[in-house]
Image (cartoon, grey):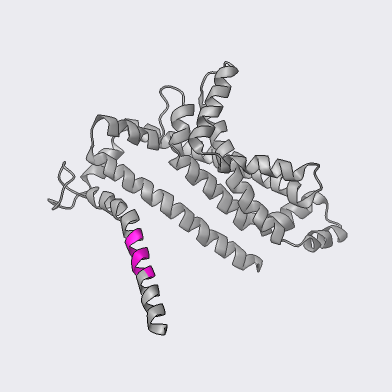
Amino acid sequence: MRESGSLGWALVRAWTLLVYMFMFLPVAVVVLLSFNASQFGSFPMTGFSFRWFVELAQNDAILRAFRTSIVLGLLTAAISTTLGVLASLALVRYRVPGSNLISTLLIAPILVPEVVLAVALLLFLNFLQINKSFTLLLLGHVIFTLPFVILVVQARLVSIKRDVEEAAMSLGASPRQTFFQITLPLMMPAVLAGALFAFTISFDDITGTLFWKPGGVETVPTQIFAMLRNSISPEINALGTVMILMTVGLPLLGLAIARKLSTKSGT
């Protein structure tokens, strides 16, 4: 009986390993080919070179797309995090009429497929006769990333005991002082995590961006999409490697910072 159980777990582990290999092997190939000296992405590699990263850094269109994506991601993170913290405080700490309905509406964008949300917002803007702009693109990203921030911050806020805040106010602290000196430091790991979630999702988003962006504005994902329509350039592999490093490295950095802050706060 034990031998059959051990064999079953071994098969599960082997199948899990195969699934992960199937998922991440293409990513590894892209990273590997970005260092290929040859212009043609094929094996065996002709040599190791940083040539395509140098050309990537000299491509004005890609640099503009990077600047746009970073500005858009930072603004999205700042707005989504601010609204997420305020909404979480209102829904968790205060009695708001219809709080369950409000919470459902705020989280609803996660439940709706992104392409449906993108088309719906685009049709709504056309109905209002509002032209597409960077501001509306930012609004779309905020709508899509806000639920992630709310879920993360709410989960942290629920675990913070109200007694700590009441003790601070009983010692003479005002509600504002209590928030900035007690509540916010205890929430900071979740706030940073939510901000990183918002930035990463905004930086990687392509479905909604294709519908919402105005003419002449390109983000990194839409720039890659445009480059793929013309030809497969080795610069795409280099750009994909940079994006992989950013989208993987930022959450890991945020996790390390959140753990350090949690250790300092003693929670």
Quarter placement of the C terminus: bottom right
Whether residue 197 is situated above or below residue 11 in the rendered picture: above
Kindly give the residue lying farthest to the top in the view shown. 129
Q: Position of residue 102 (x, y in %)?
A: 71, 41
Q: Residue at x 40, y 74 (%)?
A: 9
Residue 224 within the segment the image draws in magenta? no
Image quadrant holding the N terminus, namely bottom left
Where is residue 192 drawn, in percent x and y?
58, 52
Q: Which of the two residues, 129 or 184, is positioned nearer the viewer here?
A: 129
Task: Give the residue at the far bottom of this rendering.
Answer: 2
Image x and y of residue 89, in percent: 73, 49
Residue 219 x %, y %: 41, 34
**Span colored in magenta:** 12-19
Any part of residue 190 in sight: yes
> Along the line of sight, which residue is nearer the eye, 104 or 195?
104
In which image quadrant can residue 249 be found? Answer: bottom left
Q: Is residue 162 above or below residue 111?
A: below
Could you tell whether 26 is left or right of 121 in the image? left
Question: For the stretch drawn in magenta, what is the main secondary structure?
Answer: helix
Q: Is residue 16 magenta?
A: yes
* x 18%, y 45%: residue: 41
Left or right placement of residue 14 versus residue 196 in this view: left
Q: What's the residue at 52%, 49% (across, down)?
A: 196
